[in-house]
């Protein structure tokens, strides 16, 4: 173990050479159905599974947790620290013959089937947004349990493998999760595999000190994952890692859930609105309706 450690929440001491990697994997079928080579969902999964194995091989005490982010739900499908995982999930065959990739693929298929069935049950229309806020909250709850669970623990970090565009209606929940991660000193790394950047994850990585990257060559995704995101937090101090050229700090209004450049802010609860209104829909404060004017009327 290296001599230098990184401060964390609580009295527990983190191990700077052991990592707890929480991977949030976007499984939105509407996004992946529109993808074409060089990065289809099958190829994406091959790169990601190889990356998962490399995380576990880098250190025998590294811990990997995989959370699927669907359209209507999110679920923890794999935890490398759970020795009874195969038995609890009803996976057949000898424990020593079942590799993590086999468990992950099986649980991933089951989750996607349930998530799509939930969409049909709710008569929901096609939704291009994934439930990022839910998976972030689930990851942070798991990390808090680890931070308070013993005298020492691995260094936690979150990696978002995101392809779907941001859902403006999740703005408040996502920002709350970002500030919670910042307070707990948990970096949020972001790897964008879609066609457009994610302002939410740009802000998440910037605020928490994580890495934001949108690979320009999707066919080399594993190389990006292994060289950038596999490094532990201690080693990152000595590496020249990629940094984003800019961060989109635009917010989403609370009234229509749209991304805006300029808006109106409630002076009581700081809710953001795209247009003037008589009353705050969040805290119900009444606004002064006196029109603004640069010159006083005589």
Image (cartoon, rainbow, N blue to C red):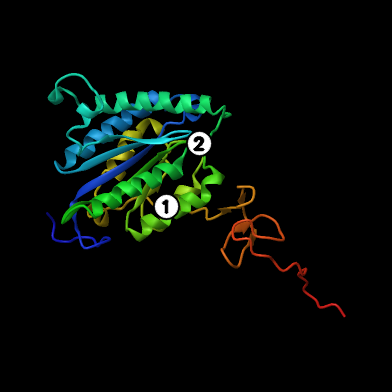
Which residue is at a point 68% across and 65% down the rendered structure image? 286
For the N terminus, the image quarter is: bottom left
Above or below, 129 relative to 244: above
Above or below, 162 relative to 107: below
Q: Give the numbered dot on residue 195.
A: 2
Q: Residues within 10 Å of mark 2 (few under 14, many from 20)?
A: few
Q: Give the numbered dot on residue 92.
A: none
Which residue is at a point 59% across and 61% down the rendered structure image? 283
Residue 9: image quadrant is bottom left
For the C terminus, the image quarter is: bottom right
Q: Is residue 17 rendered to the left or right of residue 109?
A: left
Q: Is residue 115 rendered to the left or right of residue 128?
A: left
x and y, in percent, of residue 115 in the image = 44, 28
Above or below, 248 relative to 111: below
| 178 and 151: which is toward the camera | 151
Which residue is at a point 47% across and 53% down the rendered structure image? 175
What secondary structure is found at the residue carrying circle 2? Answer: loop
Say whether residue 245 is visible: no
| 229 and 138: which is toward the camera | 138
* Residue extending furthest toward the bottom: 298
Say whether residue 167 is visible: yes
> Marks 1 and 2: in contact by CB < 8 Å?
no
Q: Give the numbered dot on residue 177.
A: 1
x and y, in percent, of residue 42 in the image = 38, 23
Q: Is residue 291 rendered to the left or right of residue 136?
A: right
- Mark 2 or mark 1: whose residue is earlier in sequence: 1
| 69 and 286: which is toward the camera | 286
């Amino acid at each position: 173990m290296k001599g230098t450690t990184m401060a964390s929440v609580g009295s527990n001491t983190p191990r700077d050479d052991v990592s707890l990697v929480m991977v949030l994997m976007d499984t939105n079928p509407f996004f992946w159905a529109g993808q074409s080579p060089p990065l289809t969902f099958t190829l994406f999964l091959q790169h990601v599974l190889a990356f998962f194995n490399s995380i576990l091989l880098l250190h025998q005490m590294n811990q990997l947790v995989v959370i699927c982010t669907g359209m209507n739900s999110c679920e923890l499908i794999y935890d490398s620290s759970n020795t009874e995982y195969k038995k609890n999930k009803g996976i057949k065959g000898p424990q020593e013959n079942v590799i993590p990739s086999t468990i992950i693929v099986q649980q991933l298929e089951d989750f996607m089937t349930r998530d799509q069935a939930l969409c049909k049950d709710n008569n929901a229309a096609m939704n291009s947004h994934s439930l990022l806020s839910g998976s972030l909250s689930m990851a942070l709850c798991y990390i808090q349990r680890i931070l308070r669970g013993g005298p020492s623990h691995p260094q936690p970090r979150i990696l978002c493998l995101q392809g779907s565009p941001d859902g403006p209606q999740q703005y408040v929940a996502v920002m709350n999760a970002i500030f919670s991660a910042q307070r707990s000193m948990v970096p949020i790394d972001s790897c964008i595999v879609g066609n457009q950047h994610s302002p939410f994850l740009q802000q998440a990585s910037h605020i928490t000190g994580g890495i934001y990257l949108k690979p320009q060559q999707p066919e080399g995704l594993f190389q990006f994952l292994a060289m950038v995101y596999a490094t532990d937090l201690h080693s990152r101090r000595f590496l020249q890692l990629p940094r984003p050229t800019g961060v989109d700090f635009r917010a989403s209004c609370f009234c229509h859930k749209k991304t805006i450049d300029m808006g109106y802010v409630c002076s009581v609860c700081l809710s953001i609105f795209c247009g003037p209104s008589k009353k705050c829909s969040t805290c119900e404060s009444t606004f002064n309706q006196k029109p603004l004017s640069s010159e006083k009327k005589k």
